Image (spheres, rainbow, N blue to C red):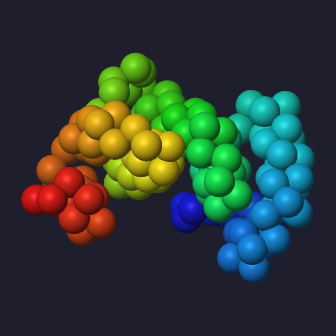
Amino acid sequence: AKSKALSQIQLECISLLRSKQYRSCELLAQMELSREEQAHSNTAITLEILGDCAHATDQFRRAIAYYRRAALQHRLKRNFGTLMSAQTPAEANLRWKEAKSLSSLGSVIEASSVLEMIPKSLRSIGICMTLGN
Protein backbone atom coordinates (compact mmCIF):
# COMPACT_ATOMS: atom_id res chain seq x y z
CA ALA A 1 0.00 0.00 0.00
CA LYS A 2 1.69 3.16 -1.13
CA SER A 3 0.53 6.61 -2.14
CA LYS A 4 1.47 10.27 -2.05
CA ALA A 5 0.41 11.23 1.46
CA LEU A 6 -0.22 8.50 3.99
CA SER A 7 -1.75 9.44 7.32
CA GLN A 8 0.15 8.67 10.52
CA ILE A 9 -2.40 5.95 11.26
CA GLN A 10 -1.91 4.39 7.81
CA LEU A 11 1.86 4.44 8.31
CA GLU A 12 1.40 2.71 11.67
CA CYS A 13 -0.92 0.14 10.06
CA ILE A 14 1.71 -0.63 7.43
CA SER A 15 4.33 -1.02 10.15
CA LEU A 16 2.04 -3.43 12.04
CA LEU A 17 1.33 -5.33 8.83
CA ARG A 18 5.05 -5.73 8.12
CA SER A 19 5.54 -6.91 11.71
CA LYS A 20 2.80 -9.52 11.14
CA GLN A 21 0.68 -7.99 13.89
CA TYR A 22 -2.43 -8.50 11.79
CA ARG A 23 -5.10 -8.14 14.46
CA SER A 24 -3.68 -4.84 15.72
CA CYS A 25 -3.30 -3.64 12.14
CA GLU A 26 -6.89 -4.57 11.33
CA LEU A 27 -8.31 -2.81 14.40
CA LEU A 28 -6.36 0.36 13.73
CA ALA A 29 -7.25 0.30 10.02
CA GLN A 30 -10.95 -0.17 10.86
CA MET A 31 -10.77 2.94 13.05
CA GLU A 32 -9.07 4.87 10.23
CA LEU A 33 -11.67 3.64 7.72
CA SER A 34 -14.47 4.85 9.97
CA ARG A 35 -12.79 8.26 10.31
CA GLU A 36 -12.28 8.51 6.54
CA GLU A 37 -15.87 7.56 5.80
CA GLN A 38 -17.18 10.17 8.26
CA ALA A 39 -14.94 12.79 6.62
CA HIS A 40 -15.97 11.63 3.12
CA SER A 41 -12.30 11.02 2.36
CA ASN A 42 -10.93 8.53 -0.16
CA THR A 43 -10.69 5.18 1.60
CA ALA A 44 -8.72 3.25 -1.04
CA ILE A 45 -5.42 2.99 0.86
CA THR A 46 -7.03 1.90 4.12
CA LEU A 47 -9.20 -0.63 2.27
CA GLU A 48 -6.07 -2.03 0.64
CA ILE A 49 -4.39 -2.35 4.05
CA LEU A 50 -7.46 -4.20 5.36
CA GLY A 51 -7.33 -6.45 2.30
CA ASP A 52 -3.67 -7.20 2.95
CA CYS A 53 -4.48 -8.11 6.58
CA ALA A 54 -7.33 -10.36 5.50
CA HIS A 55 -5.17 -12.07 2.85
CA ALA A 56 -2.32 -12.60 5.31
CA THR A 57 -4.71 -14.33 7.72
CA ASP A 58 -6.24 -16.55 5.00
CA GLN A 59 -9.53 -14.61 4.97
CA PHE A 60 -9.52 -14.54 1.19
CA ARG A 61 -13.17 -13.65 0.62
CA ARG A 62 -12.84 -10.62 2.89
CA ALA A 63 -9.59 -9.67 1.15
CA ILE A 64 -11.31 -9.80 -2.25
CA ALA A 65 -14.14 -7.58 -0.98
CA TYR A 66 -11.68 -5.01 0.40
CA TYR A 67 -9.57 -4.99 -2.78
CA ARG A 68 -12.68 -4.54 -4.94
CA ARG A 69 -13.91 -1.66 -2.78
CA ALA A 70 -10.47 -0.04 -2.96
CA ALA A 71 -10.39 -0.39 -6.76
CA LEU A 72 -13.85 1.18 -6.95
CA GLN A 73 -12.59 4.12 -4.89
CA HIS A 74 -9.79 4.63 -7.43
CA ARG A 75 -12.28 4.56 -10.32
CA LEU A 76 -14.69 6.95 -8.63
CA LYS A 77 -11.86 9.33 -7.75
CA ARG A 78 -10.87 9.53 -11.40
CA ASN A 79 -14.46 9.50 -12.72
CA PHE A 80 -14.00 6.17 -14.50
CA GLY A 81 -17.28 5.00 -12.97
CA THR A 82 -17.92 1.31 -13.37
CA LEU A 83 -15.24 0.45 -15.93
CA MET A 84 -14.03 -3.00 -15.03
CA SER A 85 -10.50 -2.80 -16.45
CA ALA A 86 -7.78 -1.21 -14.36
CA GLN A 87 -6.95 2.35 -15.35
CA THR A 88 -3.98 3.16 -13.07
CA PRO A 89 -0.94 1.28 -11.72
CA ALA A 90 -2.45 1.40 -8.21
CA GLU A 91 -5.66 -0.17 -9.46
CA ALA A 92 -3.73 -2.79 -11.44
CA ASN A 93 -1.89 -3.71 -8.23
CA LEU A 94 -5.22 -4.08 -6.41
CA ARG A 95 -6.50 -6.34 -9.19
CA TRP A 96 -3.36 -8.47 -8.88
CA LYS A 97 -3.93 -8.82 -5.13
CA GLU A 98 -7.59 -9.70 -5.81
CA ALA A 99 -6.47 -12.36 -8.28
CA LYS A 100 -4.03 -13.85 -5.75
CA SER A 101 -6.85 -14.12 -3.20
CA LEU A 102 -9.14 -15.69 -5.80
CA SER A 103 -6.41 -18.17 -6.68
CA SER A 104 -5.97 -19.02 -3.00
CA LEU A 105 -9.67 -19.91 -2.93
CA GLY A 106 -9.18 -22.19 -5.94
CA SER A 107 -10.91 -19.82 -8.37
CA VAL A 108 -8.07 -19.90 -10.89
CA ILE A 109 -10.22 -19.12 -13.94
CA GLU A 110 -11.78 -16.07 -12.26
CA ALA A 111 -8.33 -14.96 -11.11
CA SER A 112 -7.05 -15.18 -14.69
CA SER A 113 -10.04 -13.19 -15.92
CA VAL A 114 -9.31 -10.44 -13.40
CA LEU A 115 -5.68 -10.26 -14.55
CA GLU A 116 -6.61 -10.29 -18.24
CA MET A 117 -8.69 -7.15 -17.67
CA ILE A 118 -5.51 -5.26 -16.77
CA PRO A 119 -4.24 -3.41 -19.87
CA LYS A 120 -0.83 -4.66 -21.05
CA SER A 121 0.68 -1.23 -20.39
CA LEU A 122 -0.17 -1.57 -16.67
CA ARG A 123 0.94 -5.17 -16.17
CA SER A 124 3.80 -5.64 -13.75
CA ILE A 125 6.35 -8.42 -14.12
CA GLY A 126 4.44 -10.36 -11.45
CA ILE A 127 1.18 -10.05 -13.36
CA CYS A 128 2.81 -11.12 -16.62
CA MET A 129 4.45 -14.11 -14.91
CA THR A 130 1.13 -15.12 -13.35
CA LEU A 131 -0.57 -14.95 -16.75
CA GLY A 132 2.38 -16.75 -18.38
CA ASN A 133 3.19 -14.04 -20.94
The residue located at (67%, 47%) in the rendering is: 59
**Does residue 33 sit above or below 129 in this rendering?**
above
- Residue 62 found in image quarter: top right
Identify which residue, 4 or 121, lies in the foreground.
121
Image quadrant for the C terminus?
bottom left
Identify which residue, 35 or 59, lies in the foreground.
59
Residue found farthest to the front: 106
Image quadrant for the N terminus?
bottom right
Q: Position of residue 46 (x, y in %)?
A: 69, 50
**Residue 20 located left or right of residue 47:** right
Q: Position of residue 91 (x, y in %)?
A: 41, 46
Q: Position of residue 21 (x, y in %)?
A: 81, 71
Residue found farthest to the left: 133
The residue located at (20%, 60%) in the rendering is: 128
Residue found farthest to the bottom: 19
Q: Position of residue 56 (x, y in %)?
A: 65, 61
- Residue 41 found in image quarter: top right
